[in-house]
Image: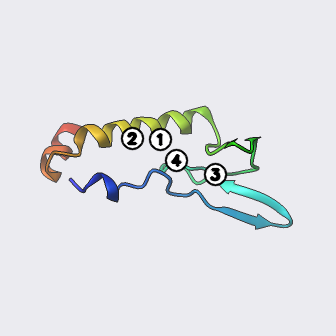
Amino acid sequence: MKSAASIPYTVHGVETALSGVSEIVCASPLCSNRFTPGGMAVNPKLYCSDKCRIDASIIRRAAALLKDLSDEEALRVIR
């Protein structure tokens, strides 16, 4: 499997300006929903929903567990 450094934790963490309203793309690698920023400035909202936040957490934890396996072994475990 690829090194942990090659696994992006924030795939869509970009901010765009559409019609004067700033929008953020959900940080989950499985989602591309756009939403208006929220939360405190120190801890801004990165995900469009709790489900996306949980999905991203599961992917990060699974990647950490599988990082030392070969690609074939990792796919066998996942399937």
Residue at 77 percent across and 66 percent down: it is 17
Local SS, label 1: helix
The C terminus lies in which quarter of the figure?
top left
In front: mark 3 or mark 4?
A: 4
Would residue 4 be found to the left or right of residue 18 on screen?
Answer: left
- Decide which of tag 1 and tag 3 comes sooner along the chain: 3
Would residue 76 be found to the left or right of residue 61 on screen?
Answer: left
Q: Amino acid at mark 3?
A: Asn
Can residue 32 be seen here? The reply is yes
Assess whether mark 3 and mark 1 are in contact (beta carbons under 8 angstroms): no
- Decide which of tag 4 and tag 1 comes sooner along the chain: 4
Would residue 27 be found to the left or right of residue 79 on screen?
Answer: right
Image: 52 above or below 20: above
Q: Which residue is denoted by mark 2 in the rendering?
A: 59
Local SS, label 4: loop
User: Gap in Å between the C-alphas at discs 4 and 2?
Assistant: 9 Å
Depth check: give the residue in front, 31 or 7. Answer: 7
Local SS, label 3: loop
Image: 37 above or below 39: below
Q: Which residue is denoted by mark 1 in the rendering?
A: 56
Rendered image: mark on residue 33: 3
Assess whether mark 1 and mark 2 are in contact (beta carbons under 8 angstroms): yes
User: Gap in Å between the C-alphas at discs 3 and 4?
Assistant: 9 Å
Residue at 71 percent across and 65 percent down: it is 16
User: Gap in Å between the C-alphas at discs 4 and 1?
Assistant: 5 Å
Q: Amino acid at mark 1?
A: Ala
